[in-house]
Image (cartoon, rainbow, N blue to C red):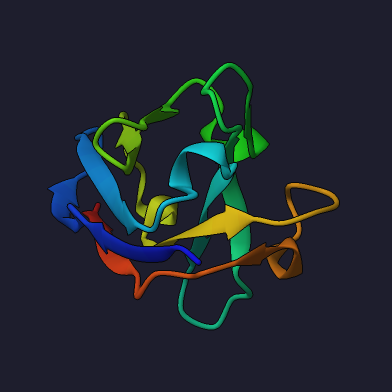
Amino acid sequence: QVQLVESGGGLVQTGGSLRLSCAASGRTFSRRAMGWFRQAPGKEREFVAYINWSGSSTQYVDSVEGRFTISRDNNKNTVYLHMNSLKPEDTAVYYCAAYKLGLVTVTSNYDSWGQGTQVTVSS
């Protein structure tokens, strides 16, 4: 099992940057692909980014491509989401989770969800 705790959210102005962290515990972390999702008020949880076990393969939703970067440090049991050029539409609670099987963009294909961290972008 993997236990996940997100941190690094906060308030930022349009065009600003944040780095989110997802700290993991559990002996199998280094062999689990991971993802970031977000959920805005009144909206369904949506896929943001994916990274495989080694960090050699990543995927992003079109709306964050070129602005967000997912990375991981398996020695520190941590996954990161670097967010640049933030927009008000990026405002949401951001969650990390461990990938299981199937399409990497599908929420139900992940487990071990963290508690989430709030990102608010002012306009």
Residues 6 and 53: in front is: 53
User: Residue at the spot x=28%, y=30% of the render?
Assistant: 75
User: Residue at the spot x=35%, y=53% of the render?
Assistant: 88
Q: Is residue 23 left or right of residue 68?
A: left
Q: Residue furthest bottom?
A: 42
Residue 89 in percent (x, y) is at 44, 54
Q: Residue furthest top?
A: 56
Relative to 53, is 101 above or below?
below
Residue 115 seen anywhere in this rendered image of the structure = yes
Q: Is residue 46 left or right of residue 55?
A: right
Residues 37 and 73: in front is: 73
Would you identify the image quadrant in which residue 71 lies? Answer: top left
Residue 93 seen anywhere in this rendered image of the structure = no
Would you identify the image quadrant in which residue 63 lies? Answer: top right
User: Residue at the spot x=30%, y=29% of the render?
Assistant: 84
Counting the numbered discs, the total is: 0
Relative to 46, is 23 above or below?
above
User: Residue at the spot x=59%, y=42% of the render?
Assistant: 33
Residue 72 in percent (x, y) is at 38, 31
Relative to 120, is 116 above or below?
below
Residue 42 in percent (x, y) is at 54, 83
